[in-house]
Amino acid sequence: MIKQAQIQEYINKNVTKTKDELGNTVWATFDAREGDDFHSETYQEAVSIFVRNWDNLTEQEKNNC
């Protein structure tokens, strides 16, 4: 099991504020399986997506994060 400090480090690297195709500010969550991002309106939603997906990743995909 990953310690809170470690998961926070992964969150900091994989959840970022960015712009979508229309120029709106959104939170992007990196999807290690697809190599692209999920867009969310709030930081909390973006973090929730990352944490929920973490257990579904292979060790190689986790290494890509």
Image (cartoon, rainbow, N blue to C red):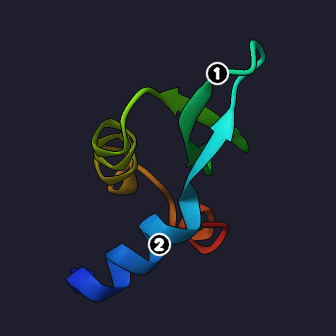
Is residue 14 toward the left or the right of residue 50 in the image? Answer: right
Please provide percent x and percent y for residue 33.
Answer: 62, 44
Q: Which mark is drawn over residue 10?
A: 2
What percent of the width, then of the height, locates residue 32? 62, 51
Mark 2, Cα crowd under 10 Å, few <14 / some 14-19 / many 20+, is some
Question: Which one is closest to the eye, mark 2 or mark 1?
Answer: 1
Q: Considering only vertical position in the picture, is 2 above or below 57? A: below
Q: Position of residue 30 (x, y in %)?
A: 60, 48
Query: Is 7 rendered above or below residue 3?
Result: above
Q: Looking at the image, is 60 positioned above or below residue 19?
A: below
Type of amino acid at the residue the image marks with label 1: Asn
Relative to 11, is 43 above or below?
A: above
Specify whether 5 is left or right of 37: left
Task: Look at 61% across and 74% down and name the residue there.
Answer: 63
**Residue occupying the point 75% across, 12% down:** 22
Q: Determine which residue is flagged by label 1.
A: 24
Residue 21 x, y percent position in the rendering? 78, 17
Identified at 56% across, 60% down, the residue is 14
Q: Where is residue 61, by image quadrant? A: bottom right
Instruction: Choose between 32 and 56: the one closer to the eye.
Output: 32
